[in-house]
Image (cartoon, rainbow, N blue to C red):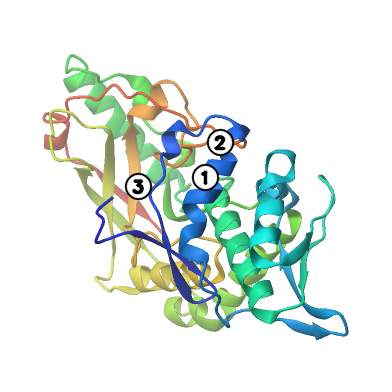
Amino acid sequence: MEVLRPQLIRIDGRNYRKNPVQEQTYQHEEDEEDFYQGSMECADEPCDAYEVEQTPQGFRSTVKAPSLLYKHIVGKRGDTRKKIEMETKTSISIPKPGQDGEIVITGQHRNGVISARTRIDVLLDTFRRKQPFTHFLAFFLNEVEVQEGFLRFQEEVLAKCSMDDGVDSSIFQNPKKLHLTIGMLVLLSEEEIQQTCEMLQQCKEEFINDISGGKPLEVEMAGIEYMNDDPGMVDVLYAKVHMKDGSNRLQELVDRVLERFQASGLIVKEWNTVKLHATVMNTLFRKDPNAEGRYNLYTADGKYIFKERESFDGRNILKIRIFLSSG
C-alpha cells in the first residue's frame, strides 16, 4: 500500500484511515492485541456520526453486531475490550458467545463513548472483511439454450486446445451455475439475511421495475476475454455481456443495486460499477468446483488461505467464438 494512498474504511458516511498491518501473518488469536494497536491509531478522533443517549449516569451508545464477531472486540483474556475501556474511560458490555444482542457502551463523557464506538466499528468492519463470503447477488443464466451453447463451447475448446498447457475439463464452469455476479456478501446472522431480502424487495419496487419496464431483460454473451495481462497464462476466462437492444439498462440496474448495498454496508465498496461477465473457465475449479474466484481468502477464524493456481494457455481458446443468449 502506498503511504500517500492509504486504505480507507467507510463507516456511517465517514472515512477512517486503516494503517498497514501484515494480514497474511495473522495466524493466531494471540496476534489480536498487536492488530488492535495498529488499526486503532486511525480512530482516535471522535466524531458526531453516532447516536449517543444521555442517561442519569452519563452517556450510552449501542452497537448491533453478529455474535460471531464478539470475540474480536473482547480479545484474548479480554485485553482488547479492557484497552478500549481504559483509553476512552468507558465501560463496554458484550453479550456472551452464541447470544444475540447489542454491544452497550457507557461512560461519563460523550466524546469517550463516541471514541469507543468508533474503535469498535473499525474492528468489526476489519474482521468482517476477513470472513469467507457466504452469499452473492447474481443473475443466474439457467436457460437451456445458454447451457447448451456453453457445452458446445466447452466441447470445441477440449477438441481443439486440450494439448495447450493447463487446459482440461476441470477448469470449466458448471453449466448449471453460469451467472452474472453483482456483488459478494458476508451475512453472519438471520437478521442480516432478512435485511438483504428486504433491501432487494425495496430495489425492485423503487427502480428495478422502472428500468426493466416490468419485463425480463434480454441479454447476449458474445466473445470471450481474460482477466490478466498475459493470454499465455490465464486464470479466469469470461464471456462478455450486453443487452440485445443495445441499451445500457442492465448496467444501470446492477450499478444501482450495488450502490444501495454498498451504502448499507452489506457489500464492501471496491468498485463504483459492476463489471458484467459470466465466468466460463477458472483455474480455482481444479481443486474446488465451488470456488467463487478470489473471494474466499480467509477462514472463519481469521486464518489466511493461500490458493495456488495453475494457469492455462488461452491463446488458441481466444480464437474460438462463443455466443450465448438469455432472456
For badge 3, the amino acid type reads Ala
The residue nearer to you, when weighing 159 against 300, is: 300
Q: CA distance from mark 3 to mark 1?
A: 37 Å
Q: Marks 2 and 1: in contact by CB < 8 Å?
A: yes
Q: Position of residue 96 (x, y in %)?
A: 84, 48
Q: Position of residue 152 (x, y in %)?
A: 30, 32
Give the residue at x 58% y 55%.
Answer: 123
Tell me, yes or no, if residue 132 can be seen here. Answer: no
Q: What residue would you read off at disc 3?
A: 278
Give the residue at x 47% y 27%.
Answer: 289
Q: Is residue 279 above or below residue 255?
A: above
* Quarter placement of the C terminus: bottom left
Q: What residue would you read off at disc 1?
A: 35
Using residue 147 as the reference point, say whether residue 315 is left or right of it. left
* Snapshot quadrant of residue 315: top left
For badge 2, the amino acid type reads Asp
Earlier-in-chain disc, 3 versus 1: 1
Q: Is residue 301 above or below residue 221?
A: above
The residue nearer to you, when weighing 33 against 156, is: 33
Q: Nearer the viewer, mark 3 or mark 1?
A: 1
Q: Which mark is residue 31?
A: 2
